[in-house]
Image (cartoon, rainbow, N blue to C red):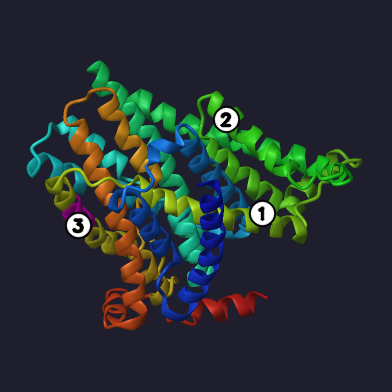
Amino acid sequence: MPALVIAFIGALVFGAHLFVALFARTRVPDVLLLIVIGLLLGPVTHLVRPEQFGSVGPVFTTVTLVFLLFESGTELQLGTIRQVLHGSFLLSVLNFVATTVVVALAAWRVAHVSVGTAVLMGAILGGTSPAVVIPIAAQLKMGKHSAAVLFLESAISDVVSIVLALALLDGLHAGNVEPGKILGALVGSFLLAGLIGAAGAVFWSNLLSRVRTLQNGMFTTAAFLFLIFGLAEMLGYSGAIAALVFGIGLGNVAWHGALMSKRFPTLEPVGLNSREKGFFAEIVFLLKTFFFVYIGLSIRFRDLSSMLFGLGVTAMLFVVRVPVVRLGVTRTTTRMDGSRMAAMAPKGLAAAVLASLPLQQKLAHGDFIQNTTYAVVLFSIVLTSVLIFLQDRTFVGGLYRWVFRGFAAEDAEDNEEAAQT
């Protein structure tokens, strides 16, 4: 049995590289194919169950998210962040509010759950998954500004979803929801987690040149990343935001290094070199491969009515996503990038994990919340993949570009970037 598992792991890694090459030719995202493998192993054939991984499963998904956010953060330049932060925040708010309202109304009016439970469902499904958005956006080779907006939107909305859903769950369990407490938790989670990540980046960038002299010291940056994440989480803040800011800090050493050198001339901060960046890219590729298979394993088909309700909710969310993107991004965004962004509203494992909590706490309709959320996670990822494929291969792409008429031509961003260089 161990030999079979090891052989399967090797085949899966080779398959993941093949799926990436297949995406370049067919526009079928490797994410979808990896999830299908997980579905076949898990809910279809029952060869593997998520419970068999015990507590390792959630830890693995967290590690994957941390690496994804960190590695993507190292590629974000502060100039780009300044240009897109307002748009990312606006898009995050619009999409989160629209999603929460749509899900809550559907759950309240169609499924006949209480208003509090309906809003909780909306908060659970309010964000988009950075673990799904980041790899797909990278493979699509979108403009750097559009990709940065999507990336930051997913990171922001994921944290908002987690904090808000947990606060609502505690309030419903205690019978008293406190808006002021929720707002304070959100602000603290973002700002203080960001400070932890920034301080960690300044400290580590000044230590990194010495660490490189250690034998087998390549993984020390990852170890420090885990410390940053763990510290933020133990203090009650967002470890994900801390990891993201830590990556941004190491990717922009020239900026904060210039500020530090004026006050502390002896300091010599350095960023990641090409070898270290390649190392992290390989880790992210491997973790991403197993992560999406694990998502497929985690989907559960227990209740046909919940699955159908989840399918209907997913369809509504993708319809609402179109006007949200039109309102949330600038007209300098190309029509193609606008179309891509409108097709990306995937939910991820964070939503699935949050959905399991109401059932664990014996909240009314907890089983319905869990089953519906699992369905939306599955259908949203599948629909994202299908829409991206259809945009390149069928008339669907023309329909999306017609919706985004008035936005920039496809080559506008390329011309702008060439002029800047």
How far across and how far down the image is residue 379, in percent?
A: 27, 57
Residue at image coords 43%, 60%? 34
Front residue of 26 and 173: 26
How far apart are labels 2 and 1 at the CA level?
22 Å
How far apart are labels 1 and 3 at the CA level?
37 Å
Amino acid type for the residue under numbered disc 1: Phe
Going from N to C along the chain, the mark reached first, 2 or 3, is: 2
Q: Which residue is mark 2?
A: 232
How far across and how far down the image is residue 27, in percent?
A: 41, 75
Q: Looking at the image, is 206 positioned above or below residue 421?
A: above
Amino acid type for the residue under numbered disc 3: Met
Q: Which residue is mark 3?
A: 316
Rendered image quadrant of residue 338? bottom left
Mark 2 or 1, closer to the camera: 1
Is residue 77 at all visible to an observer of this figure? no
- Magenta stretch: includes residue 313: yes
Q: Which residue is mark 1?
A: 280
Rendered image quadrant of residue 232? top right
How far across and how far down the image is residue 71, in percent?
A: 62, 53
Front residue of 283 and 88: 283
Q: Tags 1 and 3 in contact by the CB under 8 Å rule?
A: no
Q: Tags 2 and 3 in contact by the CB under 8 Å rule?
A: no
Going from N to C along the chain, the mark reached first, 2 or 1, is: 2
> Magenta residues: mostly which secondary structure?
helix
Mark 1 or 3, closer to the camera: 1
Q: Secondary structure at mark 2?
A: helix
Rendered image quadrant of residue 37? bottom left
- Magenta stretch: includes residue 147: no
Instruction: Report the quarter where the C terminus lies.
Output: bottom right
Q: Which residues are magenta?
A: 310-316
